[in-house]
Amino acid sequence: MASIDIRNVRKNFGIVSVLHGVDLSIENGEFVVLVGPSGCGKSTLLRMIAGLEEVTEGEIRIDGMRVNERAPKDRDIAMVFQSYALYPHMNVAENMSYGLRIRKAAREKITAAVSNAARKLELQPLLARRPKALSGGQRQRVAMGRAIVRQPKAFLFDEPLSNLDARLREQMRAEIKKLHRDLGATSIYVTHDQIEAMTLADRIVAMHEGVVQQVGSPLELYDRPANLFVAGFIGSPAMNFLSACYEIGAGTAGARLPDGTLIALSSAYQLEQGASVTLGIRPEHVEMSPASESSLRATVDLIEPTGFGIILHLGLHGLPFNVFTLDRAALTAGPTVTVAFPPQHLHLFDETGMRALETSLQKGKG
């Protein structure tokens, strides 16, 4: 296995710039997920690591060696594609062994490698079948098996579960995570699904418009998103946002909403009195509460039972606002409800969209 270093990498297609100076270091054996909306540049970055796209500017190193000018076959990486890319005229064993056969590996080595990968992926009963006789999940396991038998320095996954239904995606996520645990392989995984990112990654790289927005563990991005993009992209249902003005007093700090309601904050921030801010709170952290001075009344637009919990789609200050609760009494909510925001679960972003920097309440000035 190997480390991968990406240094100030840029990519242009003609006059269109799609990656704007990406810097990222991936440790040996680490599972890193590139996540972001379609068009953010994550698949382009993966293809540049694989050698399928040229680097316009910057440098990519695999195991300390610059690979910018190296052909894909000389980079010692294996890629698993969204489309499986299996040969329809070959059976499972032949598909899995193809990479070793073209490298003229010894027959004993090929047999042992295919047998080992088939055992890990529970493919032994399917080795004689052709791809048309396999389900989508089985085909994806064959594609992963073909990568495993090569024992490459790194595995690259390009949205490998996008073609599967919800239940199969859940099963395959678990299989990929177990596989990574067993192999200890350096892996880079591309997805637009933030649930996949949260459940699979050692570290997440959140990307938007060709720029890395934040790098950290899944819970770091969930608990302390660096900006409004990350806050809104990570988490399901998505974080709620409200416009407000920052207020600081003697030992207190708050966010004043347009209707005059003052929402208490647990910390003071390095912001000027009256600064425009965006207040964020995740739906699962909103409290359904009796009316009080700091609570807000919202209209109920839609109630969605999910089995485990209930999502309430509300209207608050003319904006969509979601609440996730485990309390089934919410199923009988009337036309309006009152909600409250626990200060410890609030997020504050400045007028540039970046997370506001906290300071001690004792340092606040009236």
Image (spheres, grey):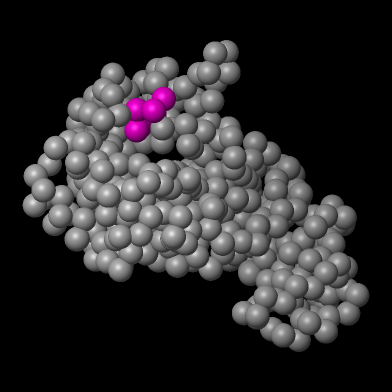
- Give x and y (percent) for residue 315: 85, 62
The magenta segment is 48-53
Q: Is residue 193 visible?
A: yes
- Give x and y (percent) for residue 191: 50, 48
| In the image, farthest residue toward the bottom | 329
Out of 166 and 35, give the one closest to the viewer.
Answer: 166
Q: Is residue 205 visible?
A: no
What is the tally of numbered marks visible in this picture?
A: 0
Q: Is residue 237 left or right of residue 101?
A: right
The residue depicted at 34 percent of the width and 28 percent of the height is: 51
The residue depicted at 72 percent of the width and 85 percent of the height is: 328
Magenta includes 37?
no
- Give x and y (percent) for residue 34: 45, 44
Out of 274 and 354, give the one closest to the viewer.
Answer: 354
Task: Please tell me in which quadrant of the rendered image residue 188 appears.
Answer: top left
Out of 312 and 360, give the one closest to the viewer.
Answer: 312
